[in-house]
């Protein structure tokens, strides 16, 4: 189906697919066609659940930290940020949602 949708947008060079035309629809087509065997891994494995929301929520903090770290050039800032995220994740895992400042 993706091959049919991407006709005229991408061409195969050796083992990889590349954009033929510079249109927005070509980029996702190239991405899918180059990684389709990796996508098939998820479809063929019964151990991987169809819903990955829990995993996505778990890595969200790391993703945001990575994006924010592109603008921060201080090692001390990054260390403090990692520590704060670690404490937050530990509290959430132990069922503590909110902390009042006077209780620590």
Image (cartoon, rainbow, N blue to C red):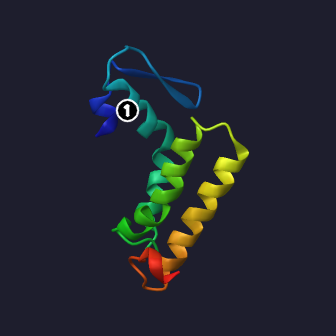
> Which x, y percent locates residue 97?
39, 78
Residue nearer the viewer, 85 or 20: 85
Residue nearer the viewer, 43 or 90: 90
Crowding at mark 1 (Cα within 10 Å: few <14, some 14-19, many 20+): many
Is label 1 in a helix, a strand or a loop? helix
Q: Is residue 55 visible?
A: yes
Name the quadrant containing residue 86. Answer: bottom right
Residue beneath the point at 38% across and 66% down: 52
Name the quadrant containing residue 50. Answer: bottom left
Quarter of the picture holding the N terminus: top left
Q: Is residue 92 visible?
A: no
Residue nearer the viewer, 40 or 65: 65
Residue beneath the point at 59% across and 55% down: 81
Residue beneath the point at 59% across and 42% down: 69
> Which x, y percent locates residue 4?
28, 32
Q: Is residue 27 left or right of residue 94?
A: left
Q: Is residue 41 above or below residue 93?
A: above
Q: Is residue 101 above or below residue 59?
A: below
State the residue position of label 1. Answer: 29
> Which x, y percent locates residue 101?
45, 74
Q: Is residue 39 above or below residue 23?
A: below
């Amino acid at each position: 189906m993706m091959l049919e949708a991407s006709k005229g947008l991408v061409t195969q060079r050796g083992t990889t697919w590349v954009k033929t035309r510079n249109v927005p629809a070509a980029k996702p087509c190239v991405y899918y066609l180059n990684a389709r065997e990796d996508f098939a891994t998820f479809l063929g494995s019964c151990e991987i659940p169809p819903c990955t929301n829990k995993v996505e929520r778990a890595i969200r903090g790391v993703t945001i930290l990575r994006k924010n770290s592109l603008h921060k050039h201080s090692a001390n800032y990054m260390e403090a940020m990692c520590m704060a995220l670690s404490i937050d994740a530990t509290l959430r895992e132990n069922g503590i949602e909110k902390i009042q400042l006077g209780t620590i």
